[in-house]
Image (spheres, rainbow, N blue to C red):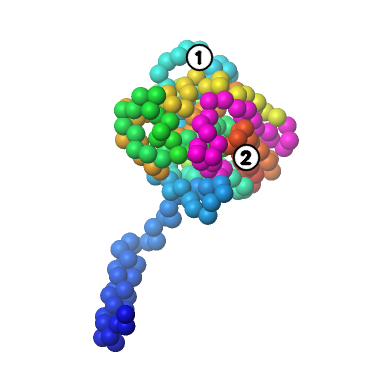
Amino acid sequence: MRRSLAGTLALRLRLQSEETRTMNAYIFPPTPQAAVPVQGSSQFYAVSRIFCVGRNYAAHAREMGFDPEREPPFYFNKTPIALTPSGATVPYPLGTRNFHHEMELVIAIGQPALRVAPQQALDCVWGYACGLDMTRRDLQAHSREKGQPWDFGKDFEHSAIIGPLASASRIGHMANGSIRLSVNGALRQNADLKDMIWSVPEIVANLSHYYHLRPGDLIYTGTPEGVGPVQPGDRIAGSIERVGEITLTIGPAG
Ligand code: MN
């Protein structure tokens, strides 16, 4: 159907005014949407929140100086702008002398979850990725001693590294499988997902009693033993069986 000249002109004017309105809506350009590439797809998973489980492997709880009794899981959060893709080079962060790697399985929520039972929780999981919960260990330890929040140690620029997402419809759900990390080729973390104190369905079910979980929510599920420091120039390579791989290079202090 042909539009009249007047109609075409009116449409063009309306589009121009919408464009101007969008440009003028913000006093500076908005931060781009945080997103994770999906394996075997040109689409992205748009991220709204990042939850992280603390001390979810007994041997890691022990190396941090805690008795790994099966207490309820606890969480901290990272800001989506901290999300950084696998393969990046990140500056050695500000304010720390003890920058640590933590290799983790990441859950990507795909359906709303509110007060779900563990038996239904996996229906709400879209897929999985390899993640690095990069940590300023000295600042975290200081906060812990003082009974202060962990944000300084955990939530900072480039602290949430993530590899491409694998859909559960393709790889299934993750109850076991090798999880490893090496630095400059030397193996540092080498465990199995079956050693998680809280399993994937238990974590999703527990968190759904405190938040309205929804698509866009990522959950870093905690790290096994073997965490340690990295220095400028170091190359980190991690992997989780069936899920994939993740790499990170530490650049000069920034
Ligand atoms: Mn962690």
Q: Residues within 10 Å of mark 2 (few under 14, many from 20)?
A: many
Residue for point 45% across, 14% down:
70
Q: x, y percentage for residue 253?
A: 60, 45
205 or 65, which lies in front?
A: 205
Residue 128 lies in the magenta stretch: no
Question: Is 3 or 198 nearer to us in this picture?
Answer: 3
Question: Which residue appears farthest toward the bottom when viewing the image?
Answer: 5
Look at mark 2 in the image and give the residue it sits on.
245
Name the amino acid type tagged 2.
Answer: Glu
Q: Secondary structure at mark 1?
A: loop
Res. 100 visible in picture? no
Mark 1 crowdedness (10 Å alpha carbons): few <14, some 14-19, many ≥20: some
Q: Which residues are magenta?
A: 157-186
Left or right: where 77 falls relative to 96: left
Q: Is residue 71 above or below residue 83?
A: above
Q: Amino acid at mark 1?
A: Pro
Q: Residue at (42%, 38%) from the top-left corner?
A: 109
Q: Is residue 235 visible?
A: yes
Whole-percent x, y for residue 140 in the image: 49, 29
Name the quadrant containing residue 48: top left
x and y percent of residue 55 in the render?
Answer: 50, 23
